Amino acid sequence: MFLPKIHIRQLRCLPKQLFLRQFCKCASQVPPEVLEELEQGFEDMKECDSKSLLKKHLTKERFDKLKDKTTPTYNSTLLDCIRSGLKNPDSGVGIYAPDPEAYSTFSDIFDPIIEDYHGGFKKTSVHPPTCFGFGSDFPNLDPDNLYIVSTRVRCGRSIKDFPFNPCLSKCDYNVLDSIITDALLNLSGEYSGTYFPLCGMEKDKQQELIDSHLLFKEGDRFLKDAKATRYWPTGRGIYINDNRNFLVWVNEEDHVRIISMEKGGNLGAVYERLILGENQLSKQLEFSRDKRLGYLTFCPTNLGTSLRASVHMRLPSLADDKAKLDKMAAKYNLQVRGTRGEHTDAEDGVYDISNKRRMGLTEYEAIQEMYKGIRALIDHECQEAAKACKK
Ligand code: ADP
Ligand code: CIR
């Protein structure tokens, strides 16, 4: 009988789950209603006006090859991977991995999307070992506080032997929550803080945390349609250190999101705090890492380093021409988001600009790429301001 390696606290959930998984393994066929939904969704996607990577790469040939497959342990189907993309034609990517095995079972669609998003990480490529380097190599990007409002660096982590959101039971959420919060409450020094579970949190408090850019938003339709918000708010929460500059999100898109942020442009300090915080946590939690793909995450855009380093910044000369801003950003492998995160608009001229690719390069190289790109954008702004002064 299949017996996964388990954490002792998982035992509470085991008997029913193992039975179901064993049972499903024996009958691991894609049910007719799932096949029907897949076929219909694929036809609709062909007709719709979508710029998603899913639509770009899911050819009829790939679709036919994958539609009858299921992952060995969790029985996840192609529909579980692409439901969000089929339901939301405005997706940029449109695919998630319901469990870690999906990356290999459905590699014919994940690999080309990964290669496209991460700028050439091929199916034969191997992600390098972790190498954070030192924050002190990155001086303040904007010492006069002219352009940058705030800086944030985050990475995502999954806990070994647990699947991703769509395959988690209510009990799994509670177990994960308890494993992760036990570790968080052991953090010391500048990392010591408080865990705030979403269950029972006052709405005003939740909104205050969202508006301060500390807490994840609620009701993301892309995640909901990927079945990543089931049993909400069970097991979800946020850990905040006493200085409010180190945070850990629990069971939102990934099991763990480790975040360091502060006002201004001191990327080196923000990055250094992330490195040491991740280090303290990795001594207590076993994170899922794949030999080829690096750190495993729910969304393929976050694989590899899973690192996103962003600034909230104003770019007066580019703000009115979003196409030009996007073009400049792309030149430096940067991605532009709105003020409240992905799929939101810029408020008061403030954009979120970050490194786009996270795979095929080390953490240090990802930060370096972002640093150089933001420097170039600031140089451009300074030149434009100087030209305007001369007029
Ligand atoms: P991620 O995928 O990194 O978690 P999101 O785009 O979902 O990012 O944004 C999550 C939250 O983080 C949002 O509230 C967003 O405004 C905030 N955020 C991102 N970058 C910064 C930054 N540099 N300064 C302040 N807040 C930020
Ligand atoms: C999309 O395709 O636009 C969404 N599914 C989000 C993709 C990347 N962002 C993320 O994982 N947060």
Image: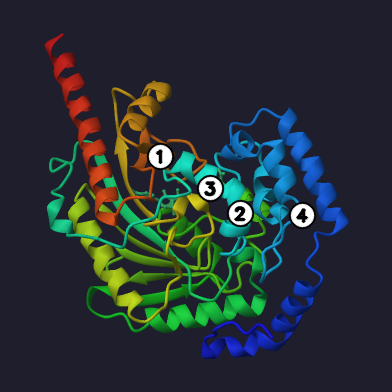
Q: How is the image coloured?
A: rainbow
**Gap between marks 4 and 2 measured at Cα:** 24 Å
| Quadrant of residue 1 within the rendered picture | bottom right
Q: Which residue is mark 4?
A: 68
Query: Which-is-in-front pick, marks 4 and 2?
Result: 4
**Gap between marks 3 and 4 measured at Cα:** 18 Å
Q: Secondary structure at mark 2?
A: helix
Crowding at dot 4, Cα within 10 Å, few <14 / some 14-19 / many 20+, comes out as: some
| Residue type marked 1 | Gly
The residue nearer to you, when weighing 180 against 54, is 54
| Quadrant of residue 285 within the rendered picture | bottom left
Query: Which-is-in-front pick, marks 1 and 4?
Result: 4
Q: Residue at x 60, y 37 (%)?
A: 57
| Residue type marked 3 | Asp
User: As drawn, is 45 to the left or to the right of 136?
Assistant: right
Crowding at dot 1, Cα within 10 Å, few <14 / some 14-19 / many 20+, comes out as: some
The residue nearer to you, when weighing 19 against 260, is 19
Tag shown at residue 111:
3
Q: Which callout, 2 or 1, points at the residue further toward the start of the chain?
A: 1
| Residue type marked 2 | Leu
Q: Which residue is mark 1?
A: 119
Q: Which callout, 1 or 4, points at the residue further toward the start of the chain?
A: 4
Spot the residue most to the front: 124
Q: Give yes or no for contact between labels 3 and 1 (Cβ–Cβ under 8 Å).
A: no
The residue nearer to you, when weighing 160 against 215, is 160
Q: Ligand 2 near label 1 (Cβ, under 8 Å)? A: no
Crowding at dot 3, Cα within 10 Å, few <14 / some 14-19 / many 20+, comes out as: some
Q: Residue at x 32, y 69 (%)?
A: 278
Q: Ligand 2 near label 2 (Cβ, under 8 Å)? A: yes
**Gap between marks 1 and 4 measured at Cα:** 30 Å
